[in-house]
Image: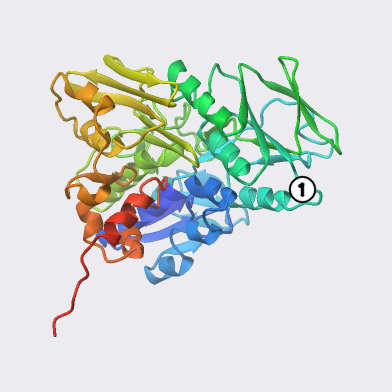
Amino acid sequence: MIAERIVVVGNGMAATRLVEELVARGAGHHITVLGDEDHAPYNRILLSAVLEGTHRADALTLREPGWHADNGIDLRLGTRVLGIDRERREVTLVDGSCLAYDRLVLATGSVPTLPPIRGLVRRDGRLHEAVHAFRSLDDCRRLLAALTADPAPQRAVIVGGGLLGLQVARALAVRGLGTEIVEGGEHVLRSQLGAPAGRVLQRALARLGTTVYTGARAVRLEGDEQPALRLDNGYTLDADLVVLTAGGRPSTALARAAGLPVRRGVVIGGRLESVDDQRVHAIGDCAEHDGRTTGFVPPAWEQAGVLAAHLSGGDVTYRGSRSVARLRATGLDVAVLGDPERTDGEVVEVTNPVLGTHRKLVVRDSRIVAGTLVGDLSRIGLITQYYDRGTPLAAHEPGALLIGEKQAPPTRLPDHAEICACAGVSAGAIRACDSLDQVRDTTRATTGCGGCAASVRELLAARPARTGTP
């Protein structure tokens, strides 16, 4: 096939996976990657682990710039795109230069939105000194610096009870701060969980020292030396730090300005192409396929793989992705498969608020089509396999999955058992590797949500030592 000029706008997890897949296929394209941050691509999902102190920031790097150079990829960090000229097939950069393309890939991710809270922004346009966003590595570093201020902050209020909000709350609590969460919905994780699971999770947070205010919205930030956040229910919360984790939307400004069809995200078809321009593609958080945007790593990586195959001459079609969301926070265990609150089917549900567990499967035509696990993820690997493969189950099996004995430890799992839900990596693929670095480089396991890291290490440690031939 003819080598093409491929320009990728974005340098996050979806873009990096696309470039890795293209390099692995060896199609010989001329690839340019434009990233508006100054950092090498990194794992955003594990930023809360850096905040908590369990990961170093440099451990989040996906690929060093030297890897791009070694593979003939033109990586341009700190580069912003001003506009797209679809007729001339050019992107214009903020410095006024233009870059021609044969194929343009939008992997622009999502952008935070500022909640309507009075006092967040000063008259000069700056955020209040106590207020922090949490979306990027720079945001994380600013928040870490704030933790070392004199006097040290004692209390933090997190605005937003979604996955990111709970991760930040736990990270700050582990560092010794008193934490409170303000959530406008009826319960935390309302986009993923039903009310019973939300209540179990809220009780778990309370046991860990975090108070949650649900059905409440922050309306005003008051004070300078001692900031306080006023809620619409009459409460006022003292807050040395206010962390904004609520509100985000697909980054579609470039696509809109170029006249591409956009609803919530850039509307794409079966080959990840804009429905109005086959030379322009979109993957990851900014893309909308079949009326849905995702916001999770596994679908973004799957889209990247399909697009790389297409750009390399393969006859492939993207038909939508499974969704497996994991909460990565010390002391909290949550996994959500698909959309259990809006998927039709028969529901098998077990709740034990005393133990802090809630398990739910949605079954249709004898197959798991969605599910929720809170408080005990010991069987998530097996359940994810059944969900992913559409395995038919006998009538008693869904209940047995929820109340049966715990799954065998990773070292006793068969080779076909899935270990990494983000990248779809089996136990056998892990056992074939010699080191954690090789696992990361060849399978991408542990580089998504990080939930499989302990299992991967167990499998590697249990491998028999390899001896060389004399």
Compared to residue 413, the image places residue 60 above or below, namely below
Assign a secondary structure to mark 1.
loop
The quadrant of the image that shows the C terminus is: bottom left
Residue wearing tag 1: 152
- The answer to whether residue 400 is above or below residue 158 is above
- Decide if residue 424 is in sight here: no
Residue 443 lies in quadrant: bottom left
Residue at image location 57% in from the left, 53% down from the top: 53
- In the image: residue 375, left or right of residue 76: left
Residue 298 screen position, x and y as percent: 35, 41
Which quadrant is the N terminus positioned in?
A: bottom left
Foreground residue among 303 and 314: 303
Query: Picture coordinates of residue 351 (x, y %)?
Result: 38, 19
- Residue at horizontal 50%, vertical 55%? 34
- Going by the numbered disc 1, the residue's amino acid type is Ala
Q: Is residue 357 left or right of residue 467?
A: right
